[in-house]
Image: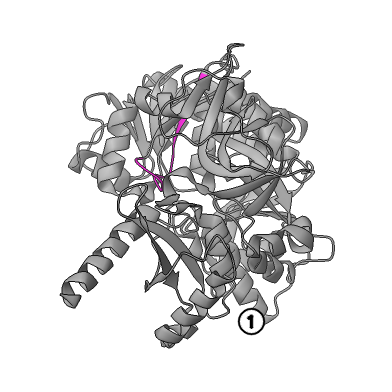
Amino acid sequence: MNVASLVLERARSEPDAPAIFFPAGRRDGDRVRYEHVTNGQLDAESDWIARGLEEVGIGRGVRTALMVRPGLDLFALTLALFKLGAIPVIVDPGLGLARLRSCLAEAEPEAFIGIPSAQAARIAFRWARATLRVAVTVGRRWLWGGPTLAELRERGRSDEPYPLAETRDEDEAAILFTSGSTGPPKGVVYRHGNFAAQIEAIRGLGTLEKGEVDLPTFPLFALFDPALGMTAVVPEMDPTRPGDVDPRRIIEAAEEFGATNLFGSPALLDTVGRYGAEHGVRLSSLRRVISAGAPVPAEVMERFLRMLPEGAEVLTPYGATECLPVACISSREVLAETGARSEQGAGVCVGAPVPSIELRIIVVRDEPIATWHASLEQPRGEVGEIVVRGPQVTEGYYKRPEANALAKIADRDGGLWHRMGDLGYLDTQGRLWYCGRKSDRVMTAQGTLYTIPCEAVFDTHPRVRRTALVGIGGAGAQESVLCVELPVSEKAANRAEVTGELLEIGARHAHTRSIRRVLFHPRFPVDIRHNAKIGRPELTRWAAGQLAARGKAAR
């Protein structure tokens, strides 16, 4: 199995159909001008690039850092690397220079393919200097050596198809780094079989059909579209800041190309949905919206659905870089039932596990669990850690034995369970309810508080944008602190009044009654990948500093 073969099937069955539309300047004033390549052209481009890369020593098993902007070059390069059997190393550019250096040092790439600014940073900050032997510049080369992508493409030009590397399911296909929102970024090792299973599971989420048009606002998901038989329209946006997207660019692209599917983070949906509500926008072609990265609030779903035709829905798959998708739920079910229960503190329902996933809930432990045994399992309805196994579940992190020990449980049949690091429970219908990250639980002297069930209660306050529960102090004696972010329109609100109202709301529920400390934060830190997951470690440090400062002032 070579994941590139899934793309080639469409290239050979529909060579003249558009594969990717990508921004290429401006037209008609401020509107984005798009260019495209067909499936056949993408196949040929990646063949030429594969030959050129092979000529400079990038071949099977060569770990290759890829730092290229979303567009034709990124698609063609990724496909070429898969054809070669090379191993792309993908790191979020928004991680920051120090973390980028750490990730690349850990991944030990032998080749580096990047745009000029990435090459300049590589040299200036000595990224992966100990292991790199080949550098390819996408664009104009300046003072550094190595060939350009344009040169390699010309050198590899041929009418003969490039022979696909005969990789197997268990062969390494890529190293994808986590976003680092809940700890140091880790390189997740994907195998060709993982990708193939993931593509099939994604296809089954919303009955995706060949010939559809996808508007993916997260570059890694755009790479799946050719394999899914879909045309990708890459919108003009900064993929590291989806929450700050210009909604007009998303709406224009959806309308121009008749997009039937959109993938976006909850933050992007919120931004575009608010614009759409304000301007009466209708997106007549969209059949479904897929959103991941964090729970999607029911009000965000409802607002976005008002722009869509009757019968369209928002799907929210649950998963992680290590395994996606794990479960999925539709807006129809959330708005009809589970959303109201979430507001009462039941957690967020993320739906039933997808068919290819086995899911269990185990007792909450922070230490490694070497071997699976039945006594680990929690009774139905009890909160515990979510563990999964299945063909799309990756086996481990690259050169991270300590992280592997914490994240994996060996089964007696030779398989592996992955510990999601998330807490939740299964209801009587077998649906999974998410209760927050294990590392974020607040352990007070009175008992343990789970973030999502607590925050959902306070988030019902009409003058609050969102809340975040953090714990200050040592485990077992933490003080629970509710951090509050107000909407822009409420920045001048009477905070004492809002605090009183929040405490009154919390007092109505047994699990939030003990939360009595409220702090207002100007704007919560969020993850760099989806701009939706709250950066709780940073928020906890801020809250601790606020409490310490108040303690000093009181003395």
Q: Does 126 sit left or right of 184 as displayed?
A: left
Q: Does 5 sit left or right of 371 as displayed?
A: right
Q: Does 543 sit left or right of 324 as displayed?
A: left
Asked if residue 156 can be seen in this view, the reply is no
Above or below, 263 against 127 in this view is below
Q: Nearer the viewer, residue 474 or 2?
A: 474
- Asked whether 312 falls inside the magenta stretch, the response is no
Callout 1, which amino acid? Glu
Residue picked out by circle 1: 278
Asked if residue 536 can be seen in this view, the reply is yes
Q: Quadrant of the C terminus?
A: bottom left
Above or below, 105 against 528 in this view is above
Question: Residue 351: image x %, image y %?
Answer: 71, 46
Q: Does 378 sit left or right of 314 as displayed?
A: left
Q: Local crowd at mark 1 within 10 Å, few (<14), some, or many (≥20)?
A: few
Q: Nearer the viewer, residue 236 or 41?
A: 236
Residue beneath the point at 53% across and 80% down:
463
> What stretch of residues is rendered in magenta?
172-184
Quarter where residue 47 is shown: top right
Question: Residue 429: image x %, image y %?
Answer: 78, 43
Question: Residue 94: image x %, image y %?
Answer: 37, 51
Q: Nearer the viewer, residue 382 or 263?
A: 382
